[in-house]
């Protein structure tokens, strides 16, 4: 964990977050600035800076996130109509929080607009 990372602080419950799903590897909470009716941030409980930092040693966390999407879809009631998952990587990719995270978006028909953190 990174003591200065806002997502690590939410994971450790040091600051509030509206958590919708959690297991030993993943924490998912509502985005403070949603761009869709359902906008959940899905993060590994291990501090991984970005997709560029995924390795054999932390790959299990990323794999568990992939499985979590289906559970989050069930919890939020969007399994049938679908959802979008976006991961911004690095400055040019629009990543502002330096902790690997995925945007889980749903609740309306989504266009081709690019989402920024």
Image (cartoon, helix red, strand yellow):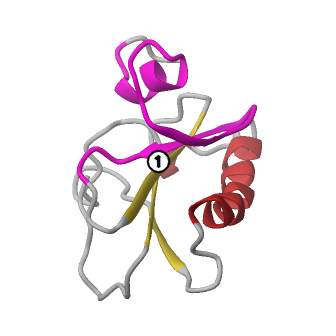
Q: Which residue is mark 1?
A: 101
Q: Position of residue 104 (x, y in %)?
A: 47, 62
Q: Residue at x 42, y 11 (%)?
A: 3
Position of 12 with respect to 91 (left or right) is right
Which residue is nearer to you in this view: 32 or 50? Answer: 32
Q: Position of residue 86 (x, y in %)?
A: 43, 66
The magenta segment is 4-33
Which residue is nearer to you in this view: 70 or 112? Answer: 70
Q: Is residue 10 magenta?
A: yes
* Picture quadrant where residue 97 is located: top left
Crowd around label 1: few <14 · some 14–19 · many ≥20 (10 Å)? many
* Picture quadrant where residue 96 is located: top left
Q: Is residue 102 magenta?
A: no
Q: Residue at x 42, y 75 (%)?
A: 107
Q: Position of residue 95 (x, y in %)?
A: 29, 50
Q: Position of residue 24 (x, y in %)?
A: 75, 31
Q: Residue at x 38, y 55 (%)?
A: 89
Which residue is nearer to you in this view: 66 or 48? Answer: 66
Position of 24 with respect to 39 (left or right) is right
């Amino acid at each position: 964990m990174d003591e200065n990372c806002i997502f690590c602080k939410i994971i450790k419950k040091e600051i509030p977050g509206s958590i919708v799903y959690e297991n030993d590897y993943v924490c998912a909470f509502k985005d403070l600035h949603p761009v869709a009716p359902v906008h959940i941030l899905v993060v590994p409980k291990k501090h991984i800076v970005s997709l560029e930092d995924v390795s054999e040693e932390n790959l299990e966390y990323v794999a568990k996130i992939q499985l979590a999407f289906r559970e989050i879809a069930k919890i939020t009631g969007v399994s049938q109509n679908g959802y979008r998952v976006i991961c911004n990587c690095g400055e040019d990719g629009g990543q502002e929080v330096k902790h690997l995270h995925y945007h889980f978006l749903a609740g309306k028909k989504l266009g081709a607009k690019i989402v920024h953190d």
